[in-house]
Image (cartoon, coloured by chain):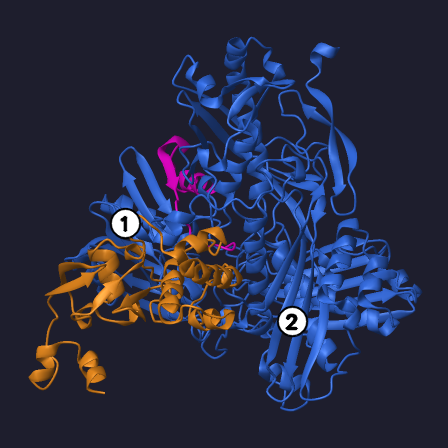
Amino acid sequence: MAADKTTRSETFPSGIASVGLGEVEREVPLDDPPPLPPNAGLAVIGKSVPRQNGRAKVTGATRFTVDVTLPGMLHGRILRSSLPHARVRALDLSAVARHPGIRAVLPVARPEDPVAALVRYIGAPVAAVAAVSQSAAEEAMRLIHVDYERLPFVADMDKAREPAAPLVHDAASAPQGSASGFPAPRGLPLNGNVRGPASDSRGDAAKGFAEADIVVEGEYRTQVQMHCCSEPHAIVADWRADGVTVYMSTQFTAGVRHELAETFGLKLSRVRVIVDGMGGGFGSKSTLGAYGRIAVALSRQAQAPVRLVLDREEEQMDSGNRPGTWQRLRIGARRDGSLTAISLLSYGTAGVALGAGVGNMAQALYACPNFTGAQHDVFINAGPGCAMRAPGNVPGAWGLEQAIDELAERLAIDPLVLRDRIDPSAVRREERRIGAERIGWQKRHAPGADPGPVKRGLGVAQSLWAANVQTNSACEVRVMRDGSVEVLSSVQDIGTGIGTVMAQTVAEVLGLRPEDIALRIGDTEYPAGSPSYGSRTTASITPAARVAAWRVLQSLLREAALALNAAPGDLIARDGRILVRDEPGRSMGFGEAAARLRTDRISAVAARGDDYGGFRRRMEDAALAQQDLGGVQFAEAAVDTETGIVRVERVVAVQDCGRPMNPLQIESQVHGGVVMGLSYALFEERILDQHTGRMVNPNLEQYKLAGAGETPAIEVVLLENYQGQSATDAYGMAEPATISTAPAIANAVYNAIGVRLRSLPMTPAAILAALGKIPARS
Amino acid sequence: MVEAASVLVGQGEAAESGGPAVVGPDPVQITLTVNGVARTIEVEPRMTLAEALRGLLGLTGTKISCGRGACSACTVWLDGATVCSCMMLAIDVGTRSVTTIEGLATGGRLHPVQAAFIEHDALQCAFCTPGIVMSCAALLERTPDPTAEDVQRAIAGHLCRCGTYPHVVAATLAAAKARKA
């Protein structure tokens, strides 16, 4: 039955390069390329190639969505609710419609509809206009008259859990699931404002705790964090009779195209989504969003392009956030450190939305036979949360990694030794070893041991993140008759430099330089690429790019073979030439071979195949690889016990993402993860006035972000971890790089002062309160 | 500090007549010297320099992110000094020369800071990058041989959500070296 065989067996490098590589056999599709050697044996992949769009970015030439101007373009503006909970009894748009500069008026809240008449948070869209200028659109806001019936509201998660609390949603209005974050499966019970639990268990937790010699228990809180993308949420919608073109600052052009088609009843072929420069998303630009639907509806009504850019206050009120959480963790262990049981109870709030769980850290990071978990979403009258860089596992790590350190101290075992005993991951074991050496773990002292008012400490924390893959992810590679090469996909570069990585991938196959490869990405006219979220872009698009390049190369080699009088299978592409493998003297230039093509260009399109060896789980267009991504971070912090100021002086981040494709760009991402994690640990917090439901710091001066002055020395170490799972064996990095930062700092703070902070952020006031120097904030 | 006072008033004639001239609300004509070229535009008095550069002159390299001087994305040079262009009205620029990110590279040659930013990957999404580049380039004008702390201080007002700060510092130090070489 050999003729029916669709795969062949191949031997891949396997293991951690710094530990020693072995081999693994995999079945691969017949027309997939041969296994890629480890980075040491490659010309372009694995090298710190400068980003291709770097020049445009440093000269200001990159066109971001906010820079797009179209002829006849109008300016949109959204009128937003000034009340945290109200019924819109009447919406009078007659005056605004008479304003000479107004070209379209759109009611969003609808008094006649029992569900759509309600606004549930300050900043919720009520109506929108498109005007000839931004100032006319702003003037128009004052001409819209809204008759609100005030309704009782609740802006605090603990109060919202009380039986008598005002209800944010009823069964009809409550969201029924969320594409992002945990836990948001459909069909969970809703009691008052509490939805859930999303339960998970294995073994017998009660029995496990009975067998424990020691049980640690703690409650941990995390604040609401805002995405604070540098580029605001922005869209330019251009509705025409033959379809709609949308320029949007988005993490997923192909996904937005689907949403537009569905929302406006259009065929996919009538919808085009384009993004060039993209000024940061971090999860908040994953979908079309209400503002996107509004802009397109305004454009349809006005029959003109409409630009809608949120201002910074709108960004902070209504563009998503990382939900706040509370969790109680109990961990039972034997004297040798082996875990007997873990129980997790959590409540979190994503405002009026879902997705406020604490992830799968407690379930999955450590070996423990018995687990029970119950996670709940709590609705409050506040702006909707959404995915934010490693949703769930960031607050999850905040609790778990402190609890494990506490357990280590109670057992009188070094925190790294305890993790060596209970963490089954060989990757993280190596990461701990490297990190401990780099940070100087042996100099770590007993908690609070430094004399004097400024006390230093060392801490460690680990991360866990799924190696996500988008199977609906494709790429085209073209070779032109003049030898030029293009790579095309709708995948977008949100700042990670994925285009450069695709160029590296294609260049490696074709034996060219990355700068020889022209990038055409961020446009749904090209094959549908993956989203830029879930740390899945590299894993999803680079195998497709390599396979497409490989297939187009085979066509080129057939032409070259005729000229070189050789068999195509004996030819290889290297250093800009096509040569006979065993006789490198017989060769021709890549361009010479291309010149022999019968047509102006040849092309191949390839999609992301299944992981070699299969996926662990599949969910429609998404899948999980067999193994997780890890990462271990170490922090050194100095705590001034008189001022309460925490200074993080050093972070060592040891991370893995399968095959590192471009170490310099990955290092940039890890820096970003660490800085964002540090900022979360020490500074950031949405402050919501409980009496009005209003965010009181909806800006970038009172909402505090870490800057250059707060950024520590960051050392990044990347593991090369080969598993032979795809044509590139590369996975993502963005999210794992931020998961362990805050708990590593918290463990360092504990080591410094001997007092554990279980609530975020660790502000000077929180430090002084923990030291008993000032009263605790209620 | 007579000089400073006249800068605050902005318009020479206004200072002579005892107070700033009353203009607006209709647009007024002004001439801005931007990247060495005099550009005459009609601006509403309420229009900021950032809006004028982006909207009227098509110089979209200057970015508006917070719109109120908290993030420094809109940084340009005014007679060589860095300012937040979102915090200044276009009519207040007067005769001072404006340099934007588009004017930093000369004759197609990147400024050493720009070249170093690419080499050291001192940018990710790069929305904040033009502003940071302007601050780092200005630093090298006044401190040709900066320390890492000097660079950190020079960009202390810039917010970069992608967290490029370590590479920005490395790139700027490298650019200083390259300029001397």
| Chain containing mark 2 | A
Q: In percent of the image, x 29 and y 71: which residue is there?
A: B87
Q: What residue type is labelled 2?
A: Arg
Q: How many marks?
A: 2
Residue named by callout 1:
B107
Label 2 residue SS: strand
Q: Is residue A558 a member of the stretch shown in magenta?
A: no
Span of residues in magenta: A255-283
- Magenta stretch: includes residue A269: yes
Measured as percent of width and height from the top left, residue A527 is found at 46, 31
Q: In which quarter of the image is the C terminus of chain A?
A: bottom right
- Outermost residue on the left side: it is B17
Picture disc at residue A221: 2
Chain ID, orange in image? B
Q: Do marks 1 and 2 share a subunit?
A: no
Question: Residue A468 falls in which quadrant of the image?
Answer: top right
Residue A475 x, y percent position in the rendering? 50, 31
Q: Callout 1, which amino acid?
A: Gly
In the figure, is residue B94 to the left or right of A32? left
